[in-house]
């Protein structure tokens, strides 16, 4: 279907309606064919379902400044204008975006970054934050972890030939970030194994690329060369994702010579408030204090899923209950949290199997709950409507009579529900060594895979 035909049909149909807001999509006809062919009609349907007027524009004829990539999805009503900054393939996320933006429009502003690698294409910037975990395994006595991290980062920066280093820079909402993770392990023979992972800014839980099964291998004294190679691999994958991703990470940069008309020049000023519009809470704010666990994000996604590490991923199940709270201060920062799971809400789908787990492995009669608590998680971006904040939380996990400090990687998005009530959507993941740290034997299989259990959490706070 041609873009211009769609424009005519949609604008004619939408002109017959009296919507209170507009959903505007900018595309570049020659570049955004995958989005147009596979997702445009779905976005049009979302606009209809949420009582929005739909407007489609060709960005090559002009697009307002501040928008650096297409497809670009914008919601506006009488309160203000908001740009969707997530994957266009995640349709439920677009619905949440509209529900939130109609009540709390985005604040103007850029995302500041420091000491960051970045790549420029047209008006778009692509940033690549680096995470280097401490060397683990049979670490030699007296090994200097700080020097190791500094030299590793130096090697990474040297090999990212398409990227430049900036002490300070600002990213627009439509720019992209890919997080590069480097995990190193040394064995008793001082052989170094370097594993790689690449995460989209839109999902810090599931990587878009990983190289764990076949890590880079070399001598510990030659670690810089391994980090050189790892950086080259991840740089190539970032550029590949930007062009070929089918899940919403690909983009088309806006050329620098495209006109930058105002919204008014394009005939898209903020709409007038519709007298018949459904009432919304225009004073929706990110309240300070305690936010309580409020169940699943949607009925199709379990509250907590778990499985053993590959190739034992067939041993999997879910946890169906959780209570607890997270505290936010007046600056939008997370200050504390305390969550409890009744272990008998765990299930692997077979009642007799569950009963054995409760009795023999978890000792549920003596230890009915597992818990995770934390204080002072350190520096992180403030939570705010219209953006997703990614944070790693180090907290105390308790299971049976054992305790362990573990890192939990989370992304938290303030949203508005169907009744314009503020909620926090939380996606998180963590890993437990259930054997070494909690004394629970895993299934038959290779080690350490049989010891490692992966957890993914999806829940709301209110």
Image (cartoon, grey):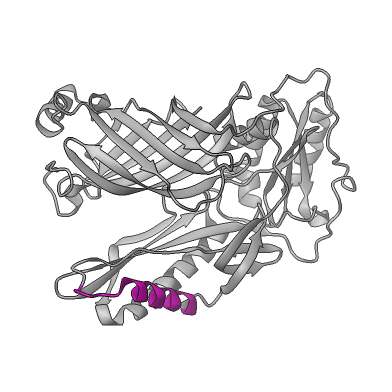
Image quarter of residue 354: top left
Residue at x 28%, y 41% (from the top left corner):
397
x and y percentages locating residue 319 in the rendered image = 30, 30
Q: Is residue 384 left or right of residue 425?
A: right
Front residue of this view, candidates 334 and 357:
334
What is the quadrant of the N terminus in the image? top right
Does the magenta-highlighted stretch encompass residue 157?
A: yes
Magenta part of the protein: which range?
140-158
Q: Is residue 187 left or right of residue 269?
A: left
Residue at x 31%, y 78% (from the top left corner):
223
The secondary structure that most of the magenta stretch takes on is helix
Image quarter of residue 182: bottom left
x and y percentages locating residue 458 in the rendered image = 42, 35
Q: Is 256 above or below relative to 147?
A: above
The tally of labels here is: 0
x and y percentages locating residue 108 in the rendered image = 73, 48
Q: Is 350 above or below relative to 438?
A: above
Front residue of this view, candidates 275 and 254:
275
Image quarter of residue 369: top left
x and y percentages locating residue 37 in the rendered image = 63, 45
Q: Is residue 297 visible?
A: no
Q: Is 345 above or below relative to 306?
A: above
Residue at x 17%, y 48% (from the top left corner):
450
């Amino acid at each position: 279907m041609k873009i211009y035909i769609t424009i005519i049909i949609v604008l004619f149909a939408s002109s017959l309606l009296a919507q209170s807001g507009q959903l505007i999509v900018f595309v570049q006809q020659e570049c955004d064919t995958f989005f147009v062919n596979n997702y445009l009609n779905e976005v049009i349907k979302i606009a209809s379902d949420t009582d929005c007027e739909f407007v489609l524009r060709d960005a090559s004829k002009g697009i307002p400044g501040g928008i650096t990539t297409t497809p670009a999805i914008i919601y506006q009503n009488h309160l203000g204008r908001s740009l969707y900054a997530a994957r266009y393939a995640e349709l439920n996320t677009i619905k949440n975006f509209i529900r939130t933006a109609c009540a709390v429009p985005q604040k103007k502003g850029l995302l500041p970054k420091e000491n960051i690698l970045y790549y420029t294409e047209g008006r778009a910037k692509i940033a690549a934050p680096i995470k280097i975990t401490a060397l683990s395994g049979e670490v030699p006595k007296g090994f200097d972890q700080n020097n190791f991290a500094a030299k590793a980062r130096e090697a990474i920066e040297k090999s990212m030939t398409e990227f430049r280093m900036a002490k300070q820079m600002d990213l627009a909402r439509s720019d992209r970030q890919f997080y590069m993770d480097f995990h190193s392990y040394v064995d008793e023979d001082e052989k170094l194994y370097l594993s790689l992972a690449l995460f989209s800014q839109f999902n810090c839980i599931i990587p878009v690329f990983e190289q764990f099964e076949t890590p880079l291998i070399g001598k510990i004294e030659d670690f810089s060369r391994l980090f050189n190679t790892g950086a080259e691999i991840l740089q190539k994958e970032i550029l590949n994702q930007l062009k070929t991703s089918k899940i919403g990470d690909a983009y088309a940069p806006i050329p620098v010579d495209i006109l930058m008309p105002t919204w008014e020049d394009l005939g898209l000023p903020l709409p007038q408030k519709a007298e018949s519009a459904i009432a919304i809470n225009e004073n929706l704010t990110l309240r300070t204090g305690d936010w309580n666990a409020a169940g699943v994000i949607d009925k199709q996604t379990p509250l907590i899923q778990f499985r053993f590490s590959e190739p034992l991923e067939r041993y999997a199940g879910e946890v169906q209950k959780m209570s607890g709270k997270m505290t936010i201060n007046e600056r939008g920062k997370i200050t504390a949290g305390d969550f409890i799971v009744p272990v008998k809400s765990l299930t692997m789908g077979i009642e007799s199997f569950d009963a054995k787990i409760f009795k023999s492995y978890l000792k549920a009669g003596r230890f009915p709950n597992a818990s995770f608590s934390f204080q002072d998680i350190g520096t992180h971006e403030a939570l705010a409507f219209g953006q997703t904040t990614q944070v790693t939380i180090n907290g105390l996990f308790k299971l049976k009579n054992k305790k362990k400090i573990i890192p939990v990687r989370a992304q938290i998005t303030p949203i508005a529900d169907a009744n314009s009530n503020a909620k926090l959507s939380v996606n998180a993941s963590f890993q437990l060594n259930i054997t070494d740290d909690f004394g629970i034997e895993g299934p038959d299989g290779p080690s350490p895979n049989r010891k490692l259990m992966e957890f993914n959490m999806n829940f709301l706070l209110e």
